[in-house]
Image: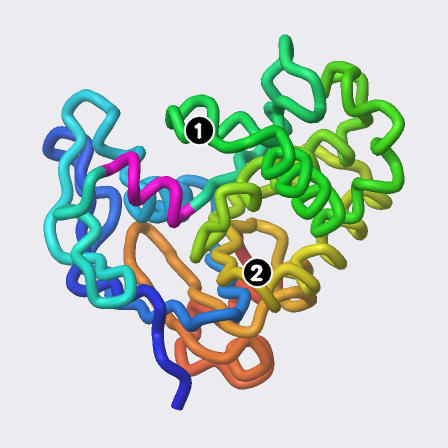
Amino acid sequence: MESPILKILNFSAYYGELEILKKINLDVYKNRVTAIMGPSGCGKTTLIRCINRMHELTPGARVSGKIYLEGEDIYEMEAIILRRRIGMVFQKPNPFPMMTIYDNVIAGYKLNGIRISKDQMDEIVERSLKATFLWDEVKDHLNRKGTFLSGGQQQRLCIARALAMNPDILLLDEPTSSLDPRSTAHIEDLIGELKKRVTILLVTHNIGQAARVSDYTAFIYLGELIEFGPTAKLFTAPDDRRTEEYVSGKFG
């Protein structure tokens, strides 16, 4: 049996009195892609915001239950250390607009006050851009602004920025929802390559995408984890009628 890198136990999340997530129990396996799917507003994004502790930045937000990263309680870790180990890429590409492509990739080191040599920076930038298949496209333009890139390239730059910190886990929140089909295909191919070096949690409302790129799938509905298991089984022989109705497009 595979060993989980992340364990979520009886985990609930709230905004004020409103319960957004209800006693979620979920194992996330190392170097695998786990898709979290479900209709809009079901709690998918809240779950990954809890995993890198962004949820608590919202006034009135609170949680109960436990999340363990390789046996460590994430809520007992320093948030800044946790966010180095669990990187996040958002729905809309968000390169820092005033920074060059080079500085965007290395931004995590500067923002965290981590001092490294110019040679180390060069190596990290090249490695991260190569990992996202962006190096050949931008290596002669590293001093141009990140916003000069296309939408799909900007999203790959944001993934490179997250990878530069060598995270254990990469959270992708609907990473292709604002991209055209060609750019989406690039990112999906990239996800398949990246899982060799990092564990990926992918939030998507795109059922086809979950089927194409993930090893495991969790289906969340109205804040509850309805079903979790290997993607092939979940799509072909789900245990719960609601899962079957969702993957067959009857609602969502």
81 is higher (above) or lower (below) than 217: above
The crowding category of the residue bearing disc 2, from other C-alpha atoms within 10 Å (few below 14, some 14 to 19, many at least 20), is: few
Residue type, mark 2 in image? Lys
129 or 238, nearer to the observer: 129
237 or 90, nearer to the observer: 90
Q: How is the image coloured?
A: rainbow
> Where residue 133 appears, x then y in whole percent?
79, 48
Mark 1 or mark 2, whichever is nearer to me: 1
Question: Which residue lies under the disc numbered 1?
Answer: 115
Question: Which residue lies under the disc numbered 2?
Answer: 250
Q: Seen from this angle, which residue lies furthest top?
A: 98
Q: Which residues are magenta?
A: 79-86
The secondary structure making up most of the magenta span is helix
Residue under the image location 29 percent in, 41 percent down: 81
37 or 4, nearer to the observer: 4
Q: Secondary structure at mark 2?
A: loop
Residue type, mark 1 in image? Arg
Name the quarter where the N terminus is drawn: bottom left
Q: CA distance from mark 1 to mark 2?
A: 53 Å
First-in-chain label (1 vs 2): 1
The crowding category of the residue bearing disc 1, from other C-alpha atoms within 10 Å (few below 14, some 14 to 19, many at least 20), is: few
Give the left or right position of residue 37, taking residue 18 as reference: right
Residue under the image location 56 percent in, 42 percent down: 164
